[in-house]
């Protein structure tokens, strides 16, 4: 029914939702851009004035900014690495026929259902705490000095917590992909003399490539904006050792009351996210076509 | 080179014996077809030989060596699957080269063998394509190519033609037969289609409920079926099976007569009936005749110019030389 008439009618019908979505996106973006050009400090209300690009130059030359960029990348890449490798391993294990498969699968999914603040608090107080934590207890059991994770390896600790939360997601996606692998292909590879490792390299991994790209894409979107885990555990510290871009913008706006600088940081974050998205889409476009 | 012997091989899934016990000899270079209705255990038997399933009991001897406990790759057999099971992300070339690569062959040797196989199978122009860019028949040939490069002791085919359309199936049937003539390697072929079995096999193994009903050449099975099952399964259209007084006239509990061994006449004959459906194929006509005296529907094959239509009265006379007689257990009486 793709006549000219139905097409224009269809356009008219979807116009309201398109306009609403556009306004939804454009208004906050426009306001942020506007604020980023103002000298706007919450401690000096009513003193806003045009500041040109000075907010941007201050934000970009802030030493914390480069630390934040590095930390953001470290969190994204670190978590992606742990979840993809761990997810493949767990998916392979869960794909084996075993007793209590259903219960084990539910247990594996559980971390994904816990909200980030709660998960981070559990890790902070029950696992990583150098006095009461489980890791400290294990260390003492072997006569070792307990390790203060959040003070001595803050970024790694954050990566660990976030990875723990995202591992179930990766496992789930990869497990369903694994189960769609044709049984006859595996048997054919067996007849062709491929051992377990060769079957994994030449058959399973290429079959999973699509699922892996989906995992990478979805997780990257969420990992660029990790916030709750940092706020609850390290508060970006010590110093700025575990501050990522999102947390830096938060600190600029609500700890230093500099709305203008925070807006400039927000816009920079949007630009960086778009650059990442551009490369991701190219990479994924290639895999999904094949 | 490629003789396979099964002795007392059985396969049990849980409490269900899919294959109670089978003894079978397959000679080197033979084209053996396992045929039977679905669920008769023919595919399971093939998978047992391939090593994809473990035997519950008995021995499989390949080439004089006991292979019962050997993993599939070490049995020296290669298999063509029903779904072809090509590796979708690899090119045709890599697909065919895969078994050689796994065997650790030299790069130059692999290239040579792959191009040889591609030439034999008319795949040379398609070597750089992916399987999904090929037609069904080409995929089938790639699967065969992957099987032949290893120069196996025997080929196993698991219903390889069932995903092809009718015309292509006839073509591939010829190609596989031709391949067997060229390679002279043992082939084991599983099908539920008795036409494939009759046209391709040196030796047919008819299976029913995990048991071998009869082993023999296509014509043996056609002319001398051991029992009612084989009689009904081999031959198209099916043999007419008649019981009761009509069979007693031939000193049998059950008599069988093939449609092509019934003489038809419009004037006289031993059975009389009304034509139900006439299927005109041009060269032949298949008549489904409702015969009187409680004999029931009988199929007869007559030449294409025998002019009858629905409702005509005809007389049928079985050729006494070609009547098959069976006792009350369904076994042939000779």
Image (cartoon, helix red, strand yellow):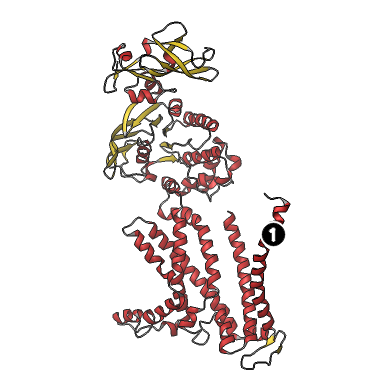
* Camera-nearest residue between B327 and B332: B327
**Any part of residue B26 in sight:** no
Question: What residue is rendered at 52% in x and 68% in y?
Answer: A219
Question: What residue is rendered at 29% in x and 13% in y?
Answer: B248
- Asked if residue A268 lies left or right of residue B75, the reply is right
Q: Position of residue A113 (x, y in %)?
A: 43, 70
In the displayed structure, would residue B322 be above or below residue B186?
above
- Asked if residue B75 lies left or right of residue B83, the reply is left
- Residue B272 in which image quadrant: top left
Tell me which chain the residue with mark 1 is part of: A
Q: Position of residue B257 (x, y in %)?
A: 38, 16
Q: Position of residue A73 (x, y in %)?
A: 55, 74
Q: Position of residue A141 (x, y in %)?
A: 29, 80
- Residue B195 in which image quadrant: top left
In the displayed structure, would residue A38 be above or below residue B11?
below
Report the number of numbered marks. Answer: 1
Q: Residues within 10 Å of mark 1 (few under 14, many from 20)?
A: few
* Camera-nearest residue between B38 and A97: B38
Residue furthest out toward the top: B267
In the displayed structure, would residue B205 be above or below residue A165?
above
Question: What residue is rendered at 29% in x and 22% in y?
Answer: B331
Q: Looking at the rendering, in which quadrant would you find the N terminus of chain B?
A: top left
- Residue A273 in which image quadrant: bottom right
* Mark 1, residue position: A11
Question: What residue is rendered at 47% in x and 45% in y?
Answer: B85
- Asked if residue A290 lies left or right of residue B191, the reply is right
**Any part of residue B112 in sight:** yes
* Camera-nearest residue between B67 and B138: B138
* Camera-nearest residue between B203 and B14: B14
Instruction: Determine whether the residue tagged by mark 1 lies in a helix, strand or loop.
Output: helix
Q: Looking at the rendering, in which quadrant would you find the C terminus of chain B?
A: top left
């Amino acid at each position: 029914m793709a006549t000219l008439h139905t097409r224009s009618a269809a356009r008219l019908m979807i116009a309201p939702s398109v306009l609403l979505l556009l306004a939804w996106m454009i208004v906050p973006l426009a306001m942020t851009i506007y604020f980023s050009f103002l000298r706007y400090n919450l401690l000096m209300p009513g003193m806003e004035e045009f500041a040109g690009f000075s907010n941007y130059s201050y934000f970009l030359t802030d030493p914390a900014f480069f630390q934040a960029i590095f930390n953001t990348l470290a969190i994204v890449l670190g978590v992606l690495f742990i979840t993809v490798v761990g997810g493949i391993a767990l998916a392979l294990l869960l794909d084996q026929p075993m007793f209590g498969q259903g219960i084990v699968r539910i247990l594996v999914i559980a971390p994904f259902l816990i909200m980030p603040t709660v998960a981070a608090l559990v890790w902070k107080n029950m696992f990583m705490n150098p006095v009461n934590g489980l890791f400290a207890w294990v260390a003492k059991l072997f006569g070792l000095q307990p390790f203060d994770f959040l003070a001595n390896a803050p970024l790694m600790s954050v990566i660990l917590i976030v990875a723990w939360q995202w591992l179930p997601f990766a496992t789930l996606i990869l497990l369903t992909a694994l189960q769609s692998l044709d049984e006859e292909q595996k048997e054919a590879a067996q007849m062709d003399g491929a051992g377990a490792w060769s079957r994994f390299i030449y058959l399973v991994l290429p079959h999973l490539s699509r699922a892996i790209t989906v995992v990478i894409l979805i997780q990257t979107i969420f990992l660029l904006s990790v916030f709750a885990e940092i706020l609850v555990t390290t508060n970006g510290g010590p110093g700025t050792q575990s501050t990522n871009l999102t947390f830096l913008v938060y600190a600029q706006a609500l700890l230093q009351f500099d709305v203008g600088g925070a807006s400039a940081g927000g816009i920079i974050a949007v630009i960086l996210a778009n650059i990442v998205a551009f490369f991701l889409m190219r990479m994924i476009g290639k895999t999904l076509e094949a | 080179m490629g003789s396979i012997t099964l002795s007392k091989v059985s396969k049990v899934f849980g409490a269900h014996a899919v294959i109670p016990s089978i003894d079978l000899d397959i000679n080197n270079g033979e084209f053996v077809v396992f045929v039977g209705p679905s669920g008769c255990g023919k595919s399971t038997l093939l998978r047992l030989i391939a090593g994809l399933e473990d035997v519950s009991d008995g021995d499989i001897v390949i080439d004089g060596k006991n292979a019962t406990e050997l993993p599939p790759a070490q049995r020296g057999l290669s298999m063509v699957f029903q779904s072809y099971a090509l590796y979708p992300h690899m090119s045709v070339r890599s697909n065919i080269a895969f078994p050689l690569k796994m065997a650790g062959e030299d790069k130059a040797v692999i290239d040579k063998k792959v191009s040889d196989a591609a030439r034999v199978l008319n795949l040379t122009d398609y070597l750089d394509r992916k399987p999904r860019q090929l037609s069904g028949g080409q995929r089938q040939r790639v699967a065969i190519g992957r099987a032949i490069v290893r120069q196996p002791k025997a080929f196993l085919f698991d219903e390889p033609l069932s995903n092809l359309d009718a015309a292509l199936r006839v073509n591939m049937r010829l190609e596989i037969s031709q391949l067997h003539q060229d390679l002279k390697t043992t082939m084991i072929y599983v099908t539920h289609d008795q036409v494939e079995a009759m046209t391709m096999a040196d030796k047919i193994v008819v299976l029913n409920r995990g048991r071998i009903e009869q082993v023999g050449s296509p014509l043996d099975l056609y002319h001398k079926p051991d029992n009612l099952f084989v009689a009904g399964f081999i031959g198209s259209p099916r043999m007419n099976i008649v019981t009761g007084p009509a069979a007693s006239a031939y000193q049998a509990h059950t008599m069988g007569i093939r449609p092509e061994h019934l003489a038809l006449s419009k004037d006289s004959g031993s059975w009389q009936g009304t034509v139900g459906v006439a299927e005109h194929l041009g060269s032949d006509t298949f008549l489904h005749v409702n015969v009187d005296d409680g004999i029931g529907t009988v199929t007869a094959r007559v030449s294409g110019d025998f002019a009858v239509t629905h409702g005509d009265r005809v007389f049928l006379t079985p050729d006494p030389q070609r009547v098959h007689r069976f006792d009350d257990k369904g076994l042939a009486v000779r």
